[in-house]
Image (cartoon, coloured by chain):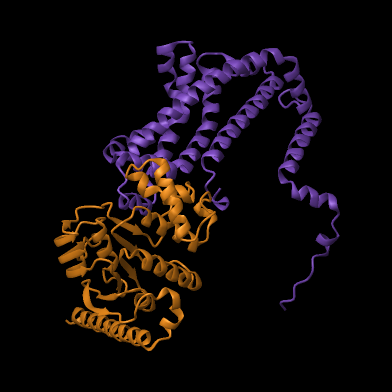
Chain colours: A orange, B purple
C-alpha cells in the first residue's frame, strides 16, 4: 500500500519568477494489487507525483509511505517504466532486462534466467541478443516493461509509458500490459494524458488539476476484470463511454477555469 | 512558366565521367597526383619537384628513412599512450567533480590554445636530447583536446539515462561503468581522433626543433640543403603515418561504438 499524506512540492521558478507549485496538499492511498491511473492536463503535477513516489525527487512537506516505510529515495520494491524507454543502446535486450537485478548484485546466471523468462512474457522471445536500436518503439517499451518486472517489484510506476507510441502499437501494448497485470496483479500507478487509456486500464482514475497541482477527484471504474480478453467490447460498452464522457466534462471545465483565471490575471495586471 | 526542361547534357554524358563521379576520392587522388607531376615537370624548378623525383628520392634514401621512421614511431606511440591515459583520465575526473572542473577548466583551455612548442625549452632543459623531450612535446600537443572532449562527453550523458540508473538503485561505481562511460565513449573517441593528428604534428615539431632525430632530423637536413625532393618525400611518409594512425584509432572507435545507429556516425 502507498500512503500519500499532505504532500507538496515546489520547483524554483526561472530567474525572477515565482516558484512553480507542482503539488499542493496531495492525499492519496494506492491499494495493494490495484491498477491506478492518474490523468490530468499538462502541468497538473502527475509526473511529479510519480517521481515523488519513486523517490527520484524529494517532496517538501507531507509523508509518502510504501508499505508503512517512508520514501527517502528509490528502492528495490518500486520499479519504473519511462516514457522515453531509457534503454541502454550499447547493451542487448537480455542485458537491459537484467539491469535492475545486476544493480542489486544478483549473479549473472540467475539474473539472465529471470530476464529470459520476462522477455518471453512480454512477447520478445528470440530477440534477446538484439540491440535496442534494432527494435521498433513498441518492442523497446516491451523491453522497458520487462526490465521493470524483472526485479519483482511490489509497485510498478509507469510514466506515460505508451505516450511516444503510435495508435496501433499503443493499443497492442495496452492489451499486453493488461494481460500481464491480470496474471501478476502487481500494484500499478500509471500516468497518462489519455482519457480512454485511463478508463480502459484502471480500477480507479485519479483526476488532477493544475496550478497548483492537486487531486480534483477520484473515480471508480466499474468495468469488470479480466478486460484483456475482450478490450474491444469493453471500449464499446456504455460504461466506458460514460466514464470517458464524465472525465471529458471535468477536463473541459478545468480548461475554462484556467482560461478565466488567466484573463482575470491579465485584467488585474493592466489596471492603472 | 513552371515547366521543367530535361537536361540532355546529363543524359547524353558518356559512362566514363559518371564513373569518375561515383568514386570522388579516387578521382580527387588522380587529379592531385597527376597535377603534381605535370606542374612539377613544366615548372622545372628545384623548389617544386615532380612527384616522380620525390618518389625516387624516397627509394634512394630508403634505409635512412626507415631507420628514422622507427625512431619517430616509437616517440609517437609513447607520447600518444601517455597523453591518452592522462587526457582521458583527467577529463573523467573533471567530469565527475565539478569543483575540479571549475578549478582547472581555464588552464586546460589556455594550454589548448597556447602554441605547444613554447614549452620546448623547458623540456630540453629537463631531458636534453633524450627521447622524453619529444614525448613531452607530443603530450603537450595532443592531451588537452582530449581533456576538453572527455569533460563534455561526461557532462552530456542524458539525464534520462542517469535517472533510469537511479530508479534501479545503481550504486555510484555501477552508474559510471555501466552508464556514464559507455554513453560518453563516442565523444571521447572523437577527442582521441582529433588528438591523433595533433600527436603526429607534435612528433615532427619535437624532432625538428629540440632533439634532432628521426623524420624531423631528415626534414631539417633536407631543408638545410634546399633539397625539396627529400623534404617532400618525408612529408609523404608522414602523411602515410598519420593515415595509419587515424585508421587504427578509427578501428578501435568502430569496435567500441558498434551500437551507434548508422546515421549518427
Out of A43 and A52, give the one closest to the viewer. Answer: A52
- Quadrant housing residue A213: bottom left
Q: Quadrant of the N terminus of chain B?
A: bottom right
Is A122 above or below relative to B218? below
Q: Is residue A91 visible?
A: yes
B134 and A184: which one is in front? Answer: A184
Quick check: B115 left or right of B246? left
Q: Is residue A259 left or right of residue B129?
A: left
> What's the residue at 65%, 25% (across, down)?
B235
Side of A271 where B164 appears, left or right? right
Q: Quadrant of residue B247?
A: top right
Circle count: 0
Image point (38%, 79%), residue name = A196
| Res. B152 visible in picture | no
What is the x, y in percent for residue B191?
48, 38
Check the image and report above or below for B207 versus B35: above
Name the residue located 26 percent from the left edge and 53 percent from the top edge. A74
Residue B256 in the image: x percent, y percent?
Answer: 51, 39
Q: Position of residue B255 (x, y in %)?
A: 55, 39
Residue A30 locus on image (x, y percent): 23, 68
The residue lying toward the viewer, choosing from B213 and A47, is: A47
B265 left or right, relative to A230: right
**Identity of the residue drawn at 33% across and 37% down:** B94
Amino acid at each position: 500500500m502507498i500512503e500519500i499524506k499532505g504532500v507538496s512540492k515546489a520547483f524554483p521558478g526561472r530567474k525572477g519568477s515565482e516558484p512553480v507549485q507542482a503539488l499542493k496538499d496531495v492525499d492519496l492511498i494506492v491499494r495493494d494489487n490495484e491498477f491506478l491511473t492518474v490523468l490530468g492536463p499538462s502541468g497538473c503535477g502527475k509526473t511529479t507525483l510519480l517521481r515523488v513516489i519513486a523517490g527520484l525527487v524529494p517532496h517538501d512537506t507531507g509523508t509518502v509511505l510504501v508499505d508503512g516505510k517512508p520514501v527517502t529515495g528509490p528502492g528495490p520494491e518500486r520499479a519504473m517504466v519511462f516514457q522515453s524507454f531509457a534503454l541502454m543502446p550499447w547493451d542487448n535486450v537480455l542485458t537491459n532486462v537484467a539491469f535492475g537485478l545486476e544493480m542489486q548484485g544478483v549473479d549473472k546466471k540467475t539474473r539472465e534466467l529471470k530476464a529470459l523468462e520476462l522477455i518471453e512474457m512480454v512477447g520478445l522471445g528470440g530477440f534477446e541478443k538484439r540491440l535496442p536500436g534494432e527494435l521498433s518503439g513498441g518492442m523497446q517499451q516491451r523491453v522497458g516493461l520487462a526490465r521493470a518486472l524483472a526485479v519483482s517489484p511490489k509497485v510498478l510506476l509507469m510514466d506515460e509509458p505508451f505516450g511516444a507510441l503510435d495508435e496501433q502499437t499503443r493499443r497492442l501494448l495496452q492489451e499486453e500490459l493488461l494481460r500481464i497485470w491480470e496474471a501478476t496483479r502487481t500494484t500499478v500507478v500509471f500516468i497518462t494524458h489519455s482519457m480512454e487509456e485511463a478508463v480502459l486500464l484502471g480500477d480507479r482514475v485519479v483526476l488532477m488539476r493544475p496550478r497548483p497541482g492537486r487531486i480534483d477527484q477520484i473515480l471508480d471504474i466499474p468495468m469488470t476484470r479480466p478486460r484483456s480478453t475482450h478490450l474491444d467490447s469493453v471500449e464499446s460498452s456504455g460504461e466506458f463511454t460514460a466514464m470517458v464522457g464524465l472525465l471529458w466534462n471535468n477536463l473541459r471545465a478545468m480548461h475554462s477555469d484556467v482560461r478565466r483565471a488567466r484573463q482575470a490575471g491579465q485584467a488585474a495586471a493592466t489596471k492603472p | 512558366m513552371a515547366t521543367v526542361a530535361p537536361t540532355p547534357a546529363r543524359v547524353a554524358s558518356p559512362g566514363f565521367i559518371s564513373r569518375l563521379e561515383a568514386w570522388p576520392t579516387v578521382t580527387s587522388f588522380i587529379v592531385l597526383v597527376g597535377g603534381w607531376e605535370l606542374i612539377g615537370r613544366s615548372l622545372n624548378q628545384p623548389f617544386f619537384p615532380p612527384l616522380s623525383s620525390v618518389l625516387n628520392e624516397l627509394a634512394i634514401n630508403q634505409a635512412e628513412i626507415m631507420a628514422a621512421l622507427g625512431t619517430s614511431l616509437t616517440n609517437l606511440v609513447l607520447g600518444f599512450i601517455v597523453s591518452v591515459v592522462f587526457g582521458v583520465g583527467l577529463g573523467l575526473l573533471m567530469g565527475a567533480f565539478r569543483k575540479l572542473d571549475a578549478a582547472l577548466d581555464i588552464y586546460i583551455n589556455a594550454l589548448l590554445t597556447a602554441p605547444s612548442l613554447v614549452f620546448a625549452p623547458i623540456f630540453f632543459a629537463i631531458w636534453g636530447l633524450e627521447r622524453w623531450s619529444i614525448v613531452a612535446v607530443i603530450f603537450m600537443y595532443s592531451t588537452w583536446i582530449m581533456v576538453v572532449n572527455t569533460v563534455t562527453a561526461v557532462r552530456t550523458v542524458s539525464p534520462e539515462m542517469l535517472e533510469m540508473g537511479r530508479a534501479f538503485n545503481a550504486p555510484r561505481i555501477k552508474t559510471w561503468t555501466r552508464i556514464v562511460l559507455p554513453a560518453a565513449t563516442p565523444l571521447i573517441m572523437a577527442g582521441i581522433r582529433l588528438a591523433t593528428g595533433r600527436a603526429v604534428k607534435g612528433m615532427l615539431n619535437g624532432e625538428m626543433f629540440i632533439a634532432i632525430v628521426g623524420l624531423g632530423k631528415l626534414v631539417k637536413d633536407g631543408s638545410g640543403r634546399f633539397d625539396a625532393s627529400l623534404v617532400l618525400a618525408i612529408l609523404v611518409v608522414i602523411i602515410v603515418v598519420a593515415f595509419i594512425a587515424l585508421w587504427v584509432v578509427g578501428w578501435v572507435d568502430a569496435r567500441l561504438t558498434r551500437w551507434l545507429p548508422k546515421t549518427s556516425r
